[in-house]
Image (cartoon, rainbow, N blue to C red):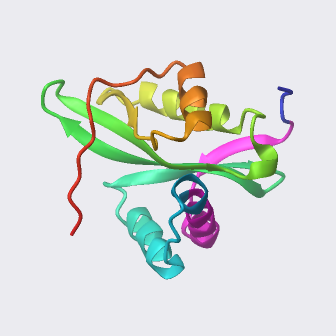
């Protein structure tokens, strides 16, 4: 893996919403075969950005072109009297994979967390069949949790 010149990581802005929606649609289809409704995803992204107490987006870009993203949302843990940051909506454009884009995003998350004394750790969920992503997360030091995720959809 060669170092990528001109790679920066920055916070997402409202003017990034359409790109983020495109990335989210691509990620959902690629990883789970789900065709998300663009307008619904776009609305969800804008709503998160307008309600900063819910979380934030990070964007990796090269020469002002977005090449990867992730979203952080917050979970309060009373057991640890602090926050877990949930890493979600991870996407790197196909031609930039295996070049350190996600690693740069993750390192940025870790740096941000060090400056916030409330952060107790990071969590993410990944489709159990997405072996490529699982290997990346393990390689960067994350370990499989003891928890099983349950959900009920409305």
Q: Residue 108's x, y, as percent?
A: 58, 34
* Among the 4 quarters of the image, the one containing residue 87: top left
Left or right of 8? Residue 113 is left
Q: Residue 86's x, y, as percent?
A: 38, 41
Instruction: Note whether 87 is above or below 89 in the view shown.
Output: above
Compare residues 115 and 144 and report the one nearer the observer. Answer: 144
Q: Which residue is drawn at the image coordinates 60% and 20% (left, top)?
A: 139
**Among all residues in the image, which is located at the extreme left?**
78
Q: Is residue 151 magenta?
A: no
Q: Residue 42's x, y, as percent?
A: 50, 74
Quadrant for the C terminus, please.
bottom left
Instruction: Note whether 3 is above or below 101 in the view shown.
Output: above
Left or right of 99? Residue 10 is left
Instruction: Note whether 66 is above or below 15 in the view shown.
Output: above
Q: Which residue is drawn at the image coordinates 18% and 24% (left, top)?
A: 80
Left or right of 118? Residue 79 is left
Q: Which residue is drawn at the image coordinates 31% and 45% (left, top)?
A: 74
In this rendering, does residue 149 appear at all?
A: yes
In this rendering, does residue 140 appear at all?
A: no
Q: Is residue 9 magenta?
A: yes
Q: Residue 16's x, y, as percent?
A: 61, 66
* Among the 4 quarters of the image, the one containing residue 78: top left
Compare residues 79 and 151 and report the one nearer the observer. Answer: 151
Compare residues 96 and 72 and report the one nearer the observer. Answer: 96
Q: Which residue is drawn at the image coordinates 86% and 37% (left, top)?
A: 5
Main SS category, magenta section: helix
* Among the 4 quarters of the image, the one containing residue 79: top left
Q: Identify the magenta region.
A: 5-27
């Amino acid at each position: 893996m060669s170092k990528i010149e001109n790679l920066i990581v920055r916070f997402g802005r409202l003017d990034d919403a359409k790109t983020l929606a495109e990335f989210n649609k691509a990620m959902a289809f690629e990883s789970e075969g789900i065709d998300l409704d663009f307008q619904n995803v776009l609305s969800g992204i804008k709503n998160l950005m307008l309600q900063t107490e819910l979380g934030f987006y990070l964007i990796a870009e090269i020469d002002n072109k977005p090449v990867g993203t992730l979203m952080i949302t917050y979970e309060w843990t009373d057991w640890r009297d602090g926050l877990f940051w949930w890493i979600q909506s991870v996407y790197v454009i196909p031609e930039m994979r295996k070049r350190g884009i996600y690693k740069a995003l993750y390192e940025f998350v870790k740096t941000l967390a060090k400056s916030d004394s409330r952060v107790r750790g990071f969590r993410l969920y990944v489709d159990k069949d997405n072996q490529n992503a699982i290997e990346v997360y393990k390689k960067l030091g994350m370990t499989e949790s003891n928890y099983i995720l349950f959900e009920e959809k409305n």
